[in-house]
Image (spheres, grey):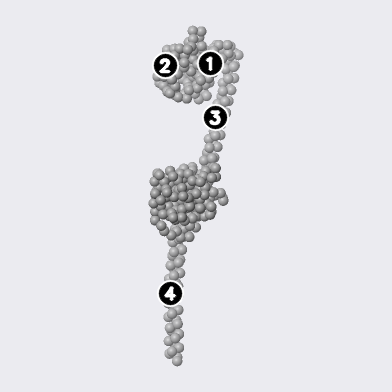
């Protein structure tokens, strides 16, 4: 009886040890899987985090995000859609692994279309098999591309939609729930990066606008000072040549490379009387006129006849400059403005 009891107790003990051993192996395996998952998540966040801070502008940020998605998500195709200001359209802004026909067909989609539309509506990542693709007009592009599985996650920032990240595979396969949770976090990270890039570009635009406004104000102040100085010269009784020479000085000081002033003559010629940054000895040889002859069809002639300013953005493309084109291009000029100076005698300022 004792032996029997012993044998019974001994048998129970062996069975318990085997059970504990099996449970330990299972727990260890679960811990290893959990650790591997955490490592992957950390690796993904690290990669996307680095990508999001490499560049401040939007295009640089998108390019870095695309590279990160290719590296860690290993999809056959990756695309980032961004929401347009109208709030109703998304544009495929960057992509990888797709044909040109596919890109052109998917370039602009309405909010609610495709896998992106499902993800945006659900507010979370979705997995779509090609057989269940929701938008008929887009399906042919995916079929032609040979895509079988599409995973899309919304890009959000502070609860506001920024766009969507689409991943595509040419083979069917399961997408574990933990991967979808990871994608949701990636979508929030990318959404914040895109929003930051937009804010940066808006700020740069505001700064550029302010700098341009300051330049215009500065040039306006320079003009006021110049006009005041010219008025003083006239009041002081300075001769015409000195006064107009100072006009040319002030124009060049305002940032223009050259300036000359001509006086309209009774014989319909324009007499150069002052200039800066320009070889004055060459001007008389050009034979500038203000009559209806070919030499009078240039800006100076038109200004004297009409008493209205003339601006030419590209001298090389303007037929009015044909007679003097070679000389003007030799000076390195491409843009010209000519303005009348009127009082009792007609002048022209070029």
Tag 3 secondary structure: helix
Q: Quadrant of the N terminus?
A: bottom left
Considering only vertical position in the picture, is 116 above or below 237?
below
Return the residue nearer the eye: 297 or 9: 297
Residue that mark 3 sits on: 215
Alpha carbon distance from label 4 to label 3: 80 Å
Label number found at residue 205: none
Alpha carbon distance from label 4 to label 2: 101 Å
Label number found at residue 306: 1
Nearer-N-terminus badge (2/1): 1
Q: Nearer the viewer, mark 1 or mark 3?
A: 1
Q: Is the residue under label 3 in contact with that under label 2 (CB below 8 Å)?
A: no
Q: Residues within 10 Å of mark 3 (few under 14, many from 20)?
A: few
Count up the numbered dots: 4
Q: Residues within 10 Å of mark 1 (few under 14, many from 20)?
A: few
Q: Nearer the viewer, mark 2 or mark 3?
A: 2
Residue that mark 4 sits on: 21
Alpha carbon distance from label 4 to label 1: 104 Å
Residue that mark 2 sits on: 323
Tag 1 secondary structure: helix
Q: Nearer the viewer, mark 2 or mark 1?
A: 1
Would residue 333 be seen by someone viewing this image from the given angle?
Answer: no
Tag 4 secondary structure: helix
Q: Nearer the viewer, mark 4 or mark 2?
A: 2
Alpha carbon distance from label 2 to label 3: 35 Å
Nearer-N-terminus badge (2/3): 3
Nearer-N-terminus badge (1/3): 3
């Amino acid at each position: 009886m004792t032996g029997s009891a012993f044998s019974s107790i001994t048998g129970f003990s062996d069975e318990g040890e085997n059970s504990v051993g099996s449970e330990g192996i299972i727990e260890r395996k679960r811990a290893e899987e959990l650790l591997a998952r955490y490592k992957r998540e950390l690796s993904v966040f690290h990669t996307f985090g680095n990508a999001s801070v490499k560049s401040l502008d939007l295009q640089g940020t998108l390019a870095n995000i695309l590279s990160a998605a290719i590296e860690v998500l290993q999809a056959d195709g990756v695309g980032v859609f961004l929401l347009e200001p109208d709030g109703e359209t998304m544009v495929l802004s960057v992509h990888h692994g797709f044909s040109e026909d596919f890109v052109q067909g998917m370039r602009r989609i309405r909010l609610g279309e495709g896998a992106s539309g499902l993800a945006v509506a659900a507010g979370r990542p979705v997995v779509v098999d090609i057989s269940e693709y929701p938008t008929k007009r887009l399906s042919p592009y995916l079929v032609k591309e040979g895509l079988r599985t599409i995973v899309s996650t919304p890009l959000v920032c502070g609860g506001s939609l920024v766009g969507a990240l689409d991943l595509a595979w040419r083979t069917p396969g399961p997408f574990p729930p933990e991967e979808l949770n990871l994608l949701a976090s990636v979508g929030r990270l990318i959404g914040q990066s895109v929003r930051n890039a937009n804010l940066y570009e808006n700020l740069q635009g505001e700064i550029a606008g302010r700098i341009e406004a300051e330049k215009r104000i500065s040039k306006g102040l320079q003009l006021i000072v110049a006009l005041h100085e010219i008025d003083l010269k006239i009041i002081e009784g300075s001769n015409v040549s000195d006064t107009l020479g100072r006009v040319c000085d002030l124009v060049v000081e305002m940032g223009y490379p050259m300036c000359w002033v001509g006086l309209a003559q009774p014989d319909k010629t324009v007499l150069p009387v002052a200039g800066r940054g320009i070889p004055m000895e060459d001007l008389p040889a050009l034979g500038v006129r203000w009559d209806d002859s070919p030499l009078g069809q240039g800006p100076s002639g038109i200004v004297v006849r009409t008493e209205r300013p003339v601006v030419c953005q590209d001298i090389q493309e303007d037929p009015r400059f044909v007679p003097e084109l070679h000389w003007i291009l030799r000076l390195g000029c491409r843009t010209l403005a000519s303005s009348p100076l009127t009082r009792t005698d007609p002048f022209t300022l070029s």
